[in-house]
């Protein structure tokens, strides 16, 4: 397996794409690259995990602030 094949659809690339999506800031060329390289079910899985982590971290911050 070559380096380009290993990088194609990698977990790190998927996490970066989902993080950019959460921020809402992404160049069109980067978006097109993501579409060409990443598998939709990987994006969905990482997005769900990221969303759950975001909600849990917000709950933790609110509880931490309320306790103080």
Image: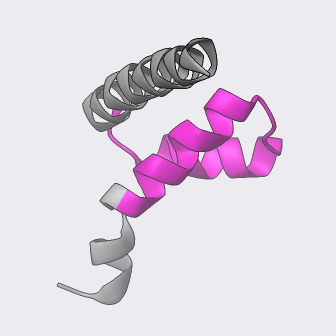
Residue 32 placement (x, y as % from top left): 65, 44
Give percent across and percent down for residue 47.
41, 27
Question: Quick check: 66 above or below 19?
Answer: above
The answer to whether residue 39 of the structure is visible from this angle is yes
Magenta region includes residue 64: no
Residue ID at (38%, 79%): 4
Q: Is residue 28 above or below residue 51?
A: below
Q: How many marks?
A: 0
Instruction: Answer left or right for 19 relative to 63.
Output: right
Q: Residue at x 80, y 41 (%)?
A: 28
Q: Residue furthest bottom?
A: 2
Residue span colored magenta:
12-40
Q: Residue at left 63%, top 29%? A: 22
Is 27 included in the stretch rendered in magenta?
yes
Comparing 61 with 28, the one in front is 61
| Drawn side of residue 11 relative to residue 60, left or right | left
Query: From the viewer's perspective, is 29 left or right of 67?
Result: right
Quarter of the rendering containing residue 31: top right
Most distant residue in the front direction? 68
The percent coordinates of residue 44 (x first, y second) are: 34, 25
Quadrant housing the C terminus: top right
Q: Residue at x 76, y 28 (%)?
A: 24
């Amino acid at each position: 397996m070559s380096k380009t094949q290993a990088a194609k659809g990698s977990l790190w690339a998927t996490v970066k794409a989902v993080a950019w999506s959460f921020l809402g800031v992404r160049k069109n060329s980067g978006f097109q690259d993501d579409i060409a390289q990443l598998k939709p079910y990987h994006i969905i899985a990482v997005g769900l995990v990221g969303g759950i982590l975001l909600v849990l971290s917000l709950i933790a911050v609110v509880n931490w602030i309320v306790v103080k």
